[in-house]
Image (cartoon, rainbow, N blue to C red):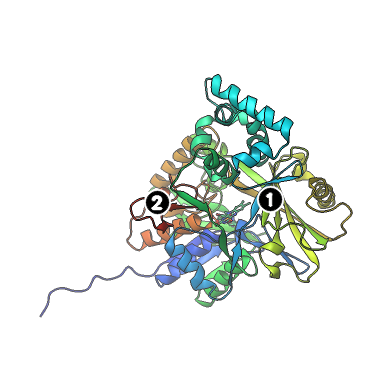
Amino acid sequence: MSTHSAPVPPAPKHLVIIGAGPAGLTAAWENMRHGGTSTVLEGDTVVGGIARTAKHNGYRFDIGGHRFFTKVKEVDALWHEVLTKDFIRVPRQSRILYRRKFFAYPLKPFQAFFGLGPLESIRIFFSYLAARISPKSPEEDLETWVSNRFGKRLFQIFFKTYTEKVWGVPCTEIQAEWAAQRIRGLSLFRAVYNSFVKDKSIKTLIDEFDYPRLGPGQMWETFHANLEEAGSKVHMETLARKIHWKSGEGVTAVEAVKDGKAQLFTGDAFVSTMPMKELAEALEPPPPPNVLAAARRLRYRDFICVALMLKGEGFFTDNWVYIHSPEVHVGRVQNFNNWSKEMVPEPGITCLGLEYFCFESDPLWLKTDAELLELGKREIFETGLVPHGTPLVDGAVVRMKKTYPMYDPGYGEAVDELRAFLAKELPNLQLVGRNGMHKYNNQDHSMLTAMYAVRNLYGASHDLWAVNVDEDYHEELRETRSDKTLTTSAP
Ligand SMILES: Cc1cc2nc3c(=O)[nH]c(=O)nc-3n(C[C@H](O)[C@H](O)[C@H](O)COP(=O)(O)OP(=O)(O)OC[C@H]3O[C@@H](n4cnc5c(N)ncnc54)[C@H](O)[C@@H]3O)c2cc1C
């Protein structure tokens, strides 16, 4: 008789998960695969977090267009497992608009040079020459770093305005090192950089991508429905406001409120996708003052989407356009008709999403919906993307807080300090996702951290913080020099 017995798989666990965005729902899904059930607490009225699809009078639009593109095979497989037949393949086009002229994206140097007229070309040429002959030093900020490489004039036209619209700080206050290493997540910068500094291994930016026919929210609504069917529960409009913990024991319960009533949720382990700053502030008892101070120095960029439904179709062929013109506040314009025809309830109308990057303390954030719609209407005509006088048939405004965790000086030390405290005192809590880890993660990496966190509970030992580190911006397909085949794996 054999003395060997098969290893006993870990018992299924019950998890308490904060947030029903891509990361939170993926954590619940992964737990379901291991036979466990989850209680997901979602403060909002809809699932999907930043990757939701907003709905208004039959129109559907994203908080910024959400492409489903990834190098992570298991995430891609999961997307297709959940939305079996509902993906469409969308051709990609996106261009830069500057002073009513379109420029290719990625930028073509010759077009940039000649496309702005002879006078501007001369200015670009001489400022480039000046930068090459006497580059400025020290090269400490983004403005100097870029100007030294491309000349001041090209910097002003193709880097400065858009970068400052997105991040809300002057380029002189953005560290050069930060630009060189991290701003490449800001795809425009990388695209322009690549067009000048040729990396032969980069074949192309992706020219098509997957998209749920009813927008990204369709993915997260399907996740939600399937999870509930399998025995997990997503509590909507239930805001986690206190994380009770004991030293040496970790989290004991999450206290959440719905309709003014507080309830305690307990489980075998806890997963958080809420912003790190808010998590620290919710700890009960509060963490030591240095930890709280570190958390409170984390900053975020907020976002307003002004959706305009305009009479007519075919205004432009792009999925989205980067607006470099300094005269307008709008940073990017999405054309949802060019993502999926089903985003618009009837033909003959175009739904545009005007993206405004701001801080929640800005006057822009505090404007009424009517004022924002008026601003959007004025600016869309000013860009020249839509002819003046085109009738507006409907409009909607969505304000979304904390869309971009900011990588400002000192943020890394702050994250490390909070992480060290949580790892020591609350070992049964795992942080995943975008704001959950204060990391510039797209859906795929947000999901992967969630998958890994749950696998760790069942015996794996993944380092969640190694996901999406030093990985090149994932729009690029690289050609491996050895076999000359296109690969989508990380370089
Ligand atoms: C403009 C823009 C465009 C983007 N485009 C793409 C793209 O093309 N492709 C792509 O893959 N990714 C894209 N992303 C990134 C993508 O949106 C994120 O990676 C993803 O949404 C992160 O998922 P998450 O679950 O970590 O966080 P979130 O989406 O932020 O979800 C967190 C959830 O937690 C809830 N929550 C927070 N605090 C609490 C609390 N205290 N109690 C209860 N619930 C709480 C929130 O309401 C939210 O639903 C884009 C992001 C932006 C801003």
Q: Is residue 142 above or below residue 39?
A: above
Residue 301: image location, x then y, percent? 63, 43
Q: Residues within 10 Å of mark 2 (few under 14, many from 20)?
A: some
Residue 322: image location, x then y, percent? 67, 47
Q: Residues within 10 Å of mark 1 (few under 14, many from 20)?
A: many
- The Cα–Cα distance between marks 2 and 1, rounded to whole angstroms, is 44 Å
Mark 1 lies on a secondary structure that is strand
Where is ligand 1, by quadrant? bottom right
Would residue 56 be visible to someone looking at this image?
Answer: yes
Of the numbered discs 2 and 1, the one sitting upstream in the chain is 1
Q: Viewer-proximal residue, 122 or 175? A: 122
Residue 411: image location, x then y, percent? 52, 36
| Residue that extends furthest to the left in the rendered view of this protein | 1
| Residue that extends furthest to the bottom in the rendered view of this protein | 1
Indicate yes or no: mark 1 CB to ligand 1 under 8 Å: no
In the picture, measured across the screen, residue 150 lies left or right of residue 70, that is right
Residue type marked 2: Pro
In the picture, measured across the screen, residue 346 lies left or right of residue 114, that is right
Q: Quadrant of the N terminus?
A: bottom left
Indicate yes or no: mark 2 CB to ligand 1 under 8 Å: no
Q: Is residue 19 above or below residue 6?
A: above
Residue type marked 1: Val
- Residue 137, numbered circle: none
What is the tally of numbered marks visible in this picture? Answer: 2
Of badges 2 and 1, the one in the foreground is 1
Residue bearing mark 1: 321
Where is residue 168, by image quadrant?
Answer: top right
Q: Viewer-proximal residue, 287 or 64? A: 64
Residue 204: image location, x then y, percent? 51, 52
Would residue 136 be visible to someone looking at this image?
Answer: no
Q: Viewer-proximal residue, 39 or 111? A: 111
Residue bearing mark 2: 427
